[in-house]
Amino acid sequence: MSFTTSLKILRYCILISMSIFSPALWAQITWEPGYIVDISGKRTDCQILYKDWMKNPRTVEYKLAGEKETRKATTADLLEFGVTGKCLFKSATVSIDLSSNNPSYAGMKWDPEWNVMNLFLKVLIEGKASLYYYQDSQIKRFYYSLEGDSIIPLIYHPYVTERENSRYLLVNESFKQQLLTSLNCNGLEFNYFETLKYTAKSMIQYFSDYNNCVHSEVKKYKSPGKGYLHLKVTAGCNNSYFSVYNSRISTKVILFDPKIIPSGGLEAEYLFPFLRNKWSMVLAPVYEKFESTATATIYNLKVTYQNIELPIGLRYSMYLRNTPLRFFLDAWFVPGFMLDFNSEFQYGPYGKLQILDGNNYALGAGIEWGRFSFNYRFYAPKDILRNYAFWSNHYNRISFALGYRIY
């Protein structure tokens, strides 16, 4: 199989994948059924542009039934809005502590530095005791209310102190005392609250337990996004090519015999907990070996290249609704280090040249159905004889792999 043929196959794979899946997949960021409640208390069913917000939104886009026009609303226009089966946000004027967790920006006061703002708070639990959540690029804050009364911040205030010309970050965790005093159904001691963490998982569990204890009906909404770790075993092949040029031994580029070589490895993928897990970081260690020969005038040439790669990639996934199918695009950075597997380049009686690896890049795409996946990856040409001025060379590779998710 020639390099040109491989490029054509790769091009066809991309075109076919995009033509089949793009219309359905791009449509996934669409309008979801929901409702708004305006400041007069009037509820209106509508379609809401659901973005699986990582940060609490400042505005919401919606369409009324029978209209094509997109409308926008802020906290000044709405009391709340909800996306059916997804989330509920309530508009509230609350005190918020904007203190940063970064010691370079945190203040030096133990008491919170309050700012009054009108925000969309995400509802995590509704019951006798309701739990709310706010997040932006710098902070995460929880709030609560009792029996629909005013919404109160649960205090978690980072601050710094200085000792011996060094700055230390400390935290005012008064939220523990607040829960002990105001939301303590089982007569829990303070020792219990000492271990309570200011995280969505801990807060949701505590408020659920409290509402169950006081025999209150509980309605849970989607918690802040959750990340996922997947691990795959992979097996496939590399279609590899090597060419060199040295004017001292040939007037033409010397093409080595192309090789289709089996490969195997692992793939670890972490799906980030926002934007519906569409973005992920991927680590894919893989073993590769390439051996080939060529003839240039009276010289016999041979290349032996063995390496364990550790590509690091950024992946964007697109999901087909109501199926376990996803289509993904990858961009990879391949760090330039290699273990010594006796990689070398031999040319006739003149000896051997040392092969050195270098940083490289790759683009890829793939399809996953449940636990099974298929992907292809096109690598940029690599210079593996860069220490030798008279040798110009290109090592090219296209890889294809099947994967099975074991975790």
Image: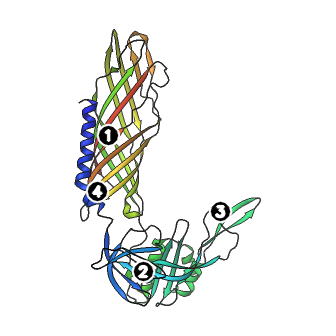
Task: For label 2, count other residues whose C-alpha is less than 10 Å away and answer few (under 14), some (14-19) or many (20+).
Answer: many
Q: Earlier in the sequence, mark 1 or mark 2?
A: 2
The residue under the point 35% across, 52% down is 231
Q: Which residue is mark 1?
A: 264
Dot label at residue 125: 2
Dot label at residue 326: 4
Secondary structure at badge 1 equals strand
Up the image or down, 8 lies above or below 63; here it is above
Dot label at residue 103: 3
Display colour scheme: rainbow
Up the image or down, 262 lies above or below 55; here it is above
Q: Earlier in the sequence, mark 1 or mark 3?
A: 3
Q: Give me the C-alpha separation between circle 3 and circle 2.
A: 32 Å
What residue type is disc 2 on?
Ile
Q: Earlier in the sequence, mark 2 or mark 4?
A: 2
Q: Do labels 1 and 2 touch, CB within 8 Å?
A: no
The residue under the point 31% across, 73% down is 32
- Residue 181 percent coordinates (x, y): 57, 86
Q: Give me the C-alpha separation between circle 1 and circle 2.
A: 46 Å
Work out whether residue 375 or residue 37 is closer to the camera in this orientation and state it. 37
Q: Earlier in the sequence, mark 3 or mark 4?
A: 3
Q: Give me the C-alpha separation between circle 1 and circle 4.
A: 22 Å
Task: For label 1, count other residues whose C-alpha is less than 10 Å away and answer few (under 14), some (14-19) or many (20+).
Answer: some
Q: Do labels 3 and 2 touch, CB within 8 Å?
A: no
Up the image or down, 2 lies above or below 122; here it is above
Q: Do labels 1 and 4 touch, CB within 8 Å?
A: no
Q: Give me the C-alpha separation between circle 1 and circle 3.
A: 45 Å
